Image: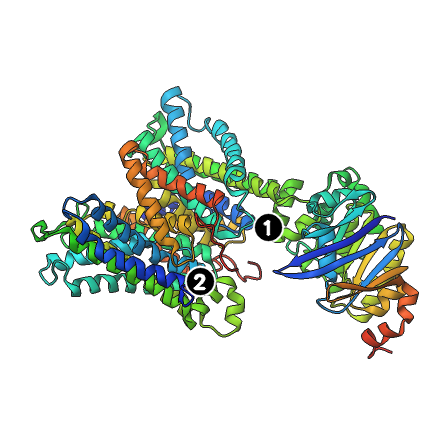
Amino acid sequence: MTPGKFAGKIPLPLAIIVAFAAVGCILPRLVQDTESSYLIYVLFQIFLFITLAQGWNLVAGYTGQISLGQHAFFGSGAYVTAMFWNSGLGGYFDPFTILLSGFAATLLAILIGIPLLSRLRGDYFALGTLGLGEILRVIVIQGGAITGGSSGLILPSSAYTSITIYYYYSLALALFATLTVYLITKSRRGLALVAVRDCEIAAAASGIHILKYKVVAFAIGAFFTGLCGSLQAYYLFQVSAPNFFSLNWTLYPVIICVLGGVGTVIGPIVGAFVLTALFEVSKEWLPMIHPILSGVLVVVVIIFLPGGILRTKLQR
Amino acid sequence: MLLDVSGLNVFYGGAQALYDVGFQIYRGEVFSIIGSNGAGKTTILKTLAGLIRPLSGQAVFDGARIDGKNPAGIVDLGISLVPEGRGLFAGMTVKENLKLGAFPKRARAMASESLAGVFDLFPKLTPLQNQIAGKLSGGEQQMLAIARSLMSRPRLLMLDEPSLGLAPLVVKTMFEIIAHLKSQGVTILLVEQNIHQALKIADRGCVIKTGRITMTGKGSDLLTDPEIQKAYMGSLQ
Amino acid sequence: MTVDTLLQLLINGILFGTMYGIAAIGLSVIFGIMHIIFLAQGTMIVLAAYCCYWLFKLYGMNPYLSAFVIVPAFLVLGQVLYHGLFRRVSVSGRFPSLLIAFGLMSLLENLMSVLWTPNPRAIDAVYSSYGITLLNLNISFTRLMAFIMAIVAAGAVTLFLKKTLLGMAVRAASENMESAMLVGITPHRVNSVAFAIGMALAGLAGIAVATVYPFDPGFGFIFSLKAMIALALGGMGSLIGALAGGILLGAIESFSSYIFSGAWADAIGYAVFLLVLMFKPEGLFVSSSNKD
């Protein structure tokens, strides 16, 4: 993204991130009753979506590989959190549990990424990742007592204190994810990633170790996605295969990035707001259409609004 | 005048490739465009064939505007391009390649006639009919490529570097074929790096340098022009 | 495991595997020309299965006869889909097309779920449990019919591609789109033909699915995956390879289902896919890859 400069010195994306952080931190203080506040709840959802989207954005926008397996990482993160907590070794918002969930997803990404990415076949990668979620769902359902089988695991909801912790945690994740994407794209590695995206053959010729960069990007994206899954597990106090390995968790980041602009730092933020607004509206009036709406949105936006709402043009 | 090109400005791959390019080709002549690698020769042909849309300028073929028209329409009008590298359907047989050459509706009715004619012209292709095109030698492939273009009964045949990658003896044959086609009344637009042969066979031609036409004139005049000799043919003479 | 059981499993696998092969051929034709893997292939198969089911349920139409309705309908559907959805983005690279296919897949699957409920459906016809006994093996009638349909379809597609001018144009465009344009072939025309063929094959596969076992909307996604695995096993370039890949997958599944369970069979199929990708990405049946 060609950054404009704010106040002459600070790149626009960075300025937006900082402003976002500032507003985000202050907001709960201004709200009367955070527990019943719709705003706080919605923002929590939005921040979660942003993080999810940035995870996909990093891979799709910057290495040009379309991952359709985010739900595999989401579910993995969630299940690791749940299983760990259940086993007594982990806990509610326990940092170790959280990190473990993230790393589980990362490990999965690396394991699957190496075979799928090692061939110059973006198509195989897309469908290969798509299959991953499916396979994991199947395996988890067979897992018996450890994974709770098809009904999943229940977590002690008595641990719930307030919504503010979810709010701040998801805000932190969203900022962290966005900042990571920003920094990566600015760094030398980032430029390498863009080179990979734009012309693999040329990139290979200039000696960039393509596979390494692709896998790293994929792994980082998976890390954030896993953390999202973990967060959702903490929020719902239960995990189950149909909910957590649902294809929707891949669909959402895709629409969000498509809406906001793939391969931009701010795009996912815009997209997350727009999508949440659309969902909240449709929940009111068209509850059944909600999942279909997602698919329609993807198709319509890609055909009629390439580059997303902001009409951003990928530097090619 | 069969083809009138004027003021062509074309962008290719993000940069301007042609600046205000213009030339005229008359019926029945061989017109050669010469220039070094990357000067814009292929871009001109691709634009005329409809593969690239010019930013501005126009190309008029026998009274009809062809700039910006899509490739199928241009082939329908009677312009056929033999691309650089031959552009054959390498996995398909010689016969299939030729049959596909007669794809335009105008040429389809005469397909069997054209096929016979093409085998007459290129007898070497007859025994190779069912061979996979990709397995032919360079010279045979070039013949096939030209033959395929002829199947569409073109009024203007555009050849992009027909001698590229061919052995000198084969090159000689290639130009004999071009001369023969000319004698049959086919108008030919030839783009070549082999300056000497290209100008020898040309009735008229022009020189292109970094996207601009620098000189236009009769083939024989260009051939003996001292500047051209110095710039392009230094090592040859 | 007795030899009989072995052969039985093998036969079942091969017979049904041809259906994966057909779906894979559809993918292969579309991929050859547009260079995208049509993710929604499986969803289309399920759609066709529903069509077959409803024609049977509501009008009592014989599923095999319904092929004469469904296949032409899907031919048209393929053209409509191409012109409606993919035409505009076909020039923008594979990214948008891939995402559109993904969106379409989600959209259709959820739509079918809402319209027809997620409950499994099955065609329970008189002959559903018929079998032929050959050399001590029980060959199920429906699987045999599925096999026959697959072979006929594969033959028809091959004939079309080899003998008709339009078919040759599709092949030519798959090889070299630019040269195809230079002989007067319009990309949109051949793209939509390829799409139509892909969809028609999906239609046929749907009939096979509907007659052989119960299905629900969620199957779409799994079928897409299996078609793609079949394609990967067989190699992108050839139709025979795609068919062979499907048969191989069918056989693998057949054995895995027996030894482990249905769910694990899917996982094993996926694992095989990953292995092939790692060690022989051009496909198991392709000797050398000098093409794509």
Q: Does dot 1 land on a helix, a strand or a loop?
A: helix
- State the residue position of label 2: A3
Instruction: Return the mark for residue B7.
Output: none
Q: In this view, does A220 lie to the left or right of B113?
A: left
For the residue carrying disc 1, how many other residues have a C-alpha within 10 Å: few (<14), some (14-19), or many (20+)? many
Tell me which chain the residue with mark 2 is part of: A
Quadrant of the image occupied by residue B158: bottom right
Q: In this view, does B28 lie to the left or right of A142?
A: right
Q: x%, y% of residue A33?
A: 14, 47
Task: Mark yes or no: residue C275 visible.
Answer: no
- Residue at point 35%, 59% (across, down): A16
Cβ atoms under marks 1 and 2 closer than 8 Å: no
Q: What residue type is labelled 1?
A: Ser
- Residue at point 64%, 45% (across, down): C168
Q: Distance between the residues labelled 1 and 2?
A: 40 Å
Which one is in front, B108 or C13?
A: B108
Q: Which amino acid does label 2 sit on?
A: Pro
- State the residue position of label 1: C174
Which one is in front, A158 or B23?
A: B23
Q: Does dot 2 land on a helix, a strand or a loop?
A: loop
Query: Which image quarter holds the N terminus of chain A?
Result: bottom left
For the residue carrying disc 2, how many other residues have a C-alpha within 10 Å: few (<14), some (14-19), or many (20+)? few
Task: Mark yes or no: residue B216 visible.
Answer: yes
Which one is in front, C211 or C25?
A: C25
Q: x%, y% of residue A22?
A: 26, 59
- Badge 1 and badge 2 in a common chain: no
Q: x%, y% of residue C101?
A: 44, 44
Q: x%, y% of residue C112?
A: 35, 33
Tell me which chain the residue with mark 1 is part of: C
